[in-house]
Image (cartoon, rainbow, N blue to C red):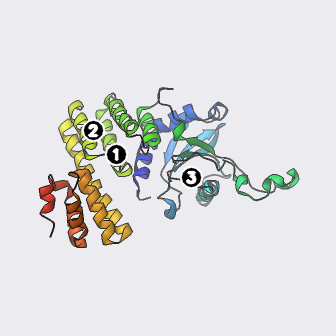
Amino acid sequence: MQIQTPHDKIFKETFSNVDVAKDFITHFLPPSVREMIDVTSIQPQKDSFTNHDLQEYFSDLLFRTKIQDKPAYVYFLFEHKSYHDSYTALQLLRYMVEIWETKRDNKEENKLPIIFPIVLYHGQTNWYAGTYFHQLLEGYKDLPEELQKYVPDYAFFLYDVSDYEDEDMQLNVFLRIILMVFRDIRKDDMQAVLDTIYRSIDYLQQLQDQHAATAYLETLFYYIFRVNRQLTKEQYYDIIDHIESNYQEGSELAMTLAEIFRNEGKEEGREEGKAEGKAEALANTTIRLITKFVAPLSEDIKKQIHEQEISTLETIIDHIDELETIEDVKQYLK
């Protein structure tokens, strides 16, 4: 599946690490379930089963393992909508059926394997839809037991990242980071966001494999820059300066992260302008990016920006990383 969102990119880069998956299963699944899953046999599978239209909201990973010494699968579904979807149980059931159909068509086994479904939830509201498929069915609870047995039902394991407390246990570094970041990145409390970012950097510094650490840091910052739109330019560059000062390859890494930051800022402007499709919206985006990347604007300059042609506004957005002062901005204004 083509990676289309920053959520998908960081989720798959993190959870495709077998040690991360093992640590999650070991520490977060109910003990009675965990004891039946052979974590030593876990192997990642390449196939993805999320619907193309839903890739913006879901990421998924499949792992082959054994449950009670029988071939089985653990299926991770990451839901990263700003609100949760009441039909997650239906979507997840569809994905599991596709997995079973794939196994049937490939004639890999005589019988269908057990699939243990896990949903990681990353929404801004508490989960309230339940975790049983029958909760979607009108009148199910009122059916007599002899009729309920003819109606399909199953439950999935839900983990809400807002429940994660990173001081509670010792986890794989990448798992600790992704759970912290998923939990905090969209908080209104900017100090909490910054604390998590700096703590993540410190965790990566402790790794023996610094090549893996710096590679992950790039993915992490791609995610942070794309998802959190409230951090200021000064805060971004304070973070980058911190990395430059504390990493052995700091200068090269800082340049890479600064480039990611500039590119994401320009992409942000293009996306917003494209989504609205109006000169007024593009002017507002231009003002916001200049304020974020350069300096606050006077009312007079804001008015001039609103009077510019769309092509001029697009040019300013495309060159936002090159602008240092308000005088640089004025050179584009007609």
Determine whether the residue tagged by mark 2 lies in a helix, strand or loop: helix
Q: Is residue 58 above or below residue 251?
A: below
Determine whether the residue tagged by mark 3 lies in a helix, strand or loop: loop
Would you say residue 17 is visible in this rendering? no
Image x and y of residue 329, in percent: 16, 59
Q: Which residue is mark 2?
A: 239
Q: Residues within 10 Å of mark 1 (few under 14, many from 20)?
A: some
Q: Which residue is mark 1?
A: 219
Image x and y of residue 128, in percent: 63, 48
- Please report whichever mark, 1 or 3, sits nearer to the chain's N-terminal start: 3
Q: Residues within 10 Å of mark 3 (few under 14, many from 20)?
A: some
Q: Which residue is mark 3?
A: 84
Q: Amino acid at mark 1?
A: Thr
Asked if the residue at tag 2 contacts the one at tag 3, i.e. Cβ–Cβ closer than 8 Å, the answer is: no
Image quarter in which the N terminus is found: bottom left
Residue at the image position 45 percent from the left and 42 percent from the top:
182
Q: Amino acid at mark 2?
A: Ile
- Please report whichever mark, 1 or 2, sits nearer to the chain's N-terminal start: 1
Is 175 left or right of 146, judged from the image as shown? left
